[in-house]
Image (cartoon, helix red, strand yellow):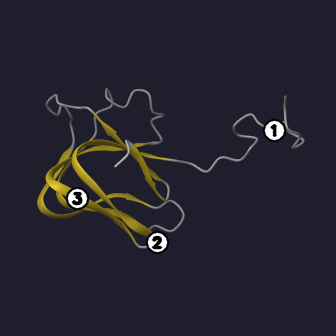
Amino acid sequence: MPGLCAQGDVLIERIDARSPINASTAQSIGDGSMVVAEGEATGHQHRLVGAVTMYRDDALARDIPPDLYVAHIRIDSPTARLEHEEHGSIILPQGTYRVRRQRQLEPIDGGLLDDSGVLED
């Protein structure tokens, strides 16, 4: 798996996090499923199936805007499956990941177009 993948409005980035979890909120499942995020447009759930710990660590997410940071997940089973009703499943290998929202950008948001819709030099 590449270091970055997306499922709808959720972006998942594999990180190298060997340090212990220093987080105020943590949720673990030994072998089951947990909701990672709900889709903004539909309310459908992005659900992880496997042995997973989900936690928030703002220090590890300091480069992400707070409104886009969802959580960190650590997959303890050999793999976990990320499911969603409208998207194909993604198999994530054991490791630690940062989960964030991605938003749809319009060309004007990225500074490509001026306010009148003309491509800037």
Q: Secondary structure at mark 3?
A: strand
Please name the amino acid that badge 1 sits on.
Leu
Q: Which mark is residue 80?
A: 3
Mark 3 or mark 1: which comes first in sequence? 3
Q: Residues within 10 Å of mark 3 (few under 14, many from 20)?
A: many
Measured in 3D between alpha carbons, the distance from the residue under mark 3 to the one under mark 1, in whole angstroms, is 41 Å
Direction from residue 46 to residue 92 in the image, left or right: left
Direction from residue 112 to residue 89 in the image, left or right: left
> Where residue 38 appears, x then y in whole percent?
41, 61
Q: Residues within 10 Å of mark 2 (few under 14, many from 20)?
A: few
Q: Which mark is residue 113?
A: 1
Please name the amino acid that badge 2 sits on.
Glu
Identify the residue at image location x=48%, y=34%.
65
Measured in 3D between alpha carbons, the distance from the residue under mark 2 to the one under mark 1, in whole angstroms, is 31 Å
> Where residue 9 appears, x then y in whole percent?
50, 55
Figure disc tally? 3
Vertical order, 87 against 117 (above or below)? below
Identify the residue at image location x=84%, y=28%.
121
Identify the residue at image location x=37%, y=41%.
3
The one nearer the camera, 2 or 73, is 2
Q: In the displayed image of the protein, which residue is found farthest to the front?
A: 1
Q: Is residue 23 visible?
A: yes
> Where residue 37 appears, x then y in whole percent?
37, 57
Direction from residue 78 to residue 1 in the image, left or right: right
Vertical order, 15 against 10 (above or below)? above
Query: Could you say which quadrant of the image residue 108 lies in?
Result: top right
Mark 3 or mark 2: which comes first in sequence? 3
The nearer-to-camera label among 3 and 1 is 3
Residue behind mark 2:
86
